[in-house]
């Protein structure tokens, strides 16, 4: 019997839990092993507390990020809250700051204003809610919470934050507070943020790539492309096109390899190999339609990979026509996914990086 996939907790939930434990320690002296952190949609999640360390009138609380069965770059790293409670008149105030390892926004178009720490709106509200829960009975004064991520600057290099204009560390994220395995919420959010930043820069043309290599090949072909136009959309074909249209883009380009082109030409909304395979029977039919040697059709139908098909057709005079045919089908699918609001073009590369299609 297969084991169910394990959910995880977002960086926002880790920060909220750390803040909550810090307030409780300062108000009661209690060193808790876990807290029930509030979640943005409602409810709570029990979060283990790694360390509670008093320091100079404040307390530093550490929670370890756990991505469950869908780990990301922050999985296993420490998220900290440095909490200080100060007396004062008037109603209780909560001040949230970003410290070491938390990025800072430098470009417009992000969910936070330029100059602000990259703590997104839902986690901000979540952290404040956690603080107020822990501070029940405290009616005045101020609670200051500074979120820190000791390895944040290093972790951020493996994320899209530098491209998005978030410098100095990671973002504190999470609209739901929990990480649902393979929901792809964080990747989709990154696509949305990239598109938003590009539009805020005045761009009306987005360049969708399937990863770093296809991005690099596109830049080699078109070196004048603004960096903010580049969106690593990965396998999210339908989502990326719909999001581009929703953000007001009128033009887009896809830079990809032959295998992804074949899948996009099938009209697949999501092109990951694990769930959406190549339809080799359809590909064989399209080879015939493009004028490839009919003798190759049985081998195409029996192929295991798109690369195998491309190699098989290496000397077939119909291969360029096949690639153009596939690009046409992919273009129609892309434009359909955008609600026919975005005009799309393609640059297609072979698996060694040679350009197969596109000016």
Image (cartoon, rainbow, N blue to C red):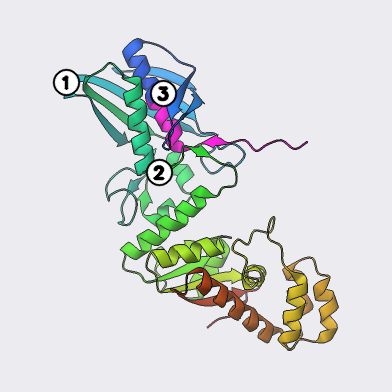
Which segment is the magenta one?
1-19
Corner quadrant of residue 297: bottom right
Secondary structure beneath label 3: strand
Determine which residue is flagged by label 3. 61
Mark 1 or mark 2: which is in front? 1
Q: Is residue 322 left or right of residue 162?
A: right
Label 2 residue SS: strand
Q: Which residue is mark 2?
A: 169
Could you tell which of marks 3 and 2 lies nearer the N-terminus? 3
Mark 1 Cα-neighbour bin, 10 Å: few <14, some 14–19, many ≥20: few
Q: Residues within 10 Å of mark 3 (few under 14, many from 20)?
A: many
Mark count: 3
Disc 1: which residue: 88
Q: In terms of image quadrants, where is residue 202?
A: bottom left
Question: Of circles 3 and 1, which is in front?
Answer: 1
What's the CA distance linking mark 1 and mark 2?
32 Å
- What SS does tag 1 mark? strand
């Amino acid at each position: 019997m297969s084991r169910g996939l394990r959910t995880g907790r977002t960086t926002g939930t880790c920060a909220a839990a750390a803040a909550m434990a810090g307030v409780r320690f300062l108000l009661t002296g209690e060193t808790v092993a876990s807290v029930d952190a509030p979640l943005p949609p409602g409810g709570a999640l029990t979060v283990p507390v790694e360390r509670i360390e008093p320091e100079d009138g404040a307390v530093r609380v550490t929670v370890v990020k756990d991505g469950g069965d869908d780990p990301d770059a922050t999985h296993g790293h420490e998220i900290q809250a440095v909490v200080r409670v100060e007396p004062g008149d008037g109603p209780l105030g909560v001040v949230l700051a970003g410290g070491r390892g938390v990025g800072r926004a430098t470009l417009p178009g992000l969910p936070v204003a330029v100059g602000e720490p990259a703590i997104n709106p839902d986690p901000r509200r979540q952290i404040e809610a956690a603080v107020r829960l822990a501070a029940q009975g405290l009616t005045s004064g101020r609670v200051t919470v500074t979120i820190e991520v000791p390895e944040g600057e290093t972790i951020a290099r493996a994320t899209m934050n530098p491209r998005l204009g978030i410098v100095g560390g990671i973002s504190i994220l999470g609209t739901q507070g929990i990480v649902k395995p393979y929901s792809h919420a964080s990747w989709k959010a990154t696509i949305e943020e990239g598109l938003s930043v590009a539009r805020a820069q005045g761009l009306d043309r987005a360049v969708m790539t399937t990863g770093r290599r296809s991005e690099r090949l596109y830049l080699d072909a078109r070196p004048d492309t603004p960096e903010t136009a580049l969106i690593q959309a990965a396998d999210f074909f339908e989502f990326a096109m719909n999001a581009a249209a929703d953000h007001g883009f009128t033009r887009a380009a896809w830079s990809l390899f032959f295998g992804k082109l074949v899948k996009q030409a099938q009209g697949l909304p999501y092109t990951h190999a694990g769930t959406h395979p190549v339809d080799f029977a359809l590909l064989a039919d399209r080879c015939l339609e493009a004028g490839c040697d009919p003798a190759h059709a049985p081998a195409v139908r029996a192929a295991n990979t798109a690369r195998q098909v491309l190699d098989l057709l290496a000397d077939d005079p119909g291969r360029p026509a096949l690639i153009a045919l596939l690009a046409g089908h992919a273009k129609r699918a892309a434009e359909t996914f955008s609600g026919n609001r975005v005009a799309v073009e393609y640059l297609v590369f072979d698996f060694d990086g040679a350009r197969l299609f596109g000016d």
